[in-house]
Amino acid sequence: MRVYCRECGCKGLNKGSDHLSRDFVKIYYTCSSVHCGHRWVSTVTFSHTTTPSSEQVDRIIFDRLRELPKAKQREIFAQLGAA
Ligand SMILES: [Zn+2]
C-alpha cells in the first residue's frame, strides 16, 4: 500500500508496525524527502468482508444444517445422494 506525506506529497517510507489485533494495525512512516522530515502514524483497520473465507462458508453450512430438524437433514442428504 503506497502512502504519501500529507505535508509535501512525497512517498512515505514504512518504518515498522504494531499489530494491536488482527483487525487493527498501526504503521509508522517517515517522509522520503530529506527536506521534509515528517514522521507519522497511520492505522489500518478491517472494514468488511467482500468474499467469505471457505472455512467460514463451511461453518455456516454446517451450523445451518445442524439447526434443521432431523427429517429435514435426511431430506437434504437424500437429495445430495448421501443417504
Ligand atoms: Zn513530506
Image: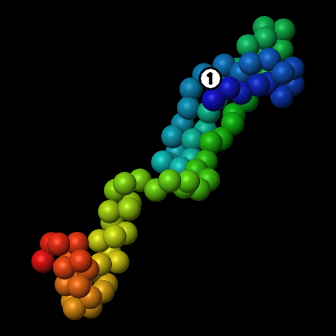
Above or below for 12 versus 68: above
Left or right relative to 36: residue 46: left
Q: Residue at x 74, y 18 (%)?
A: 11
- Quadrant in which residue 41 is drawn: top right
Above or below for 20 versus 39: below
Above or below for 81 versus 50: below
Question: Which quadrant, please, contains the C terminus?
Answer: bottom left
Q: Kindly identify the amino acid type of the residue bearing the numbered disc 1.
A: Asn
Q: Give coordinates of residue 29: x percent, y percent.
A: 68, 25
Above or below for 20 versus 3: below
Left or right relative to 38: residue 71: left
- Quadrant in which residue 13 is drawn: top right
Q: Give coordinates of residue 20: x percent, y percent.
A: 52, 45
Q: Which of these two is toward me, 51 or 20?
A: 51
Q: Which of these two is toward me, 18 or 65?
A: 65
Left or right relative to 31: residue 74: left
Mark 1, secondary structure of its residue: strand
Left or right relative to 50: residue 81: left
Q: Give coordinates of residue 4: x percent, y percent.
A: 76, 25
Query: Does residue 39 show up?
Result: no
The residue indicated by pointer 1 is: 14
Q: Which residue is farthest top?
A: 34
Ligand 1 neighbours mark 1 (CB distance < 8 Å): no
Q: Residues within 10 Å of mark 1 (few under 14, many from 20)?
A: some
Question: Which quadrant, please, contains the N terminus?
Answer: top right
Q: Residue at x 71, y 27 (%)?
A: 3
Q: Residue at x 35, y 77 (%)?
A: 64
Q: Which of these two is toward me, 26 or 11?
A: 11
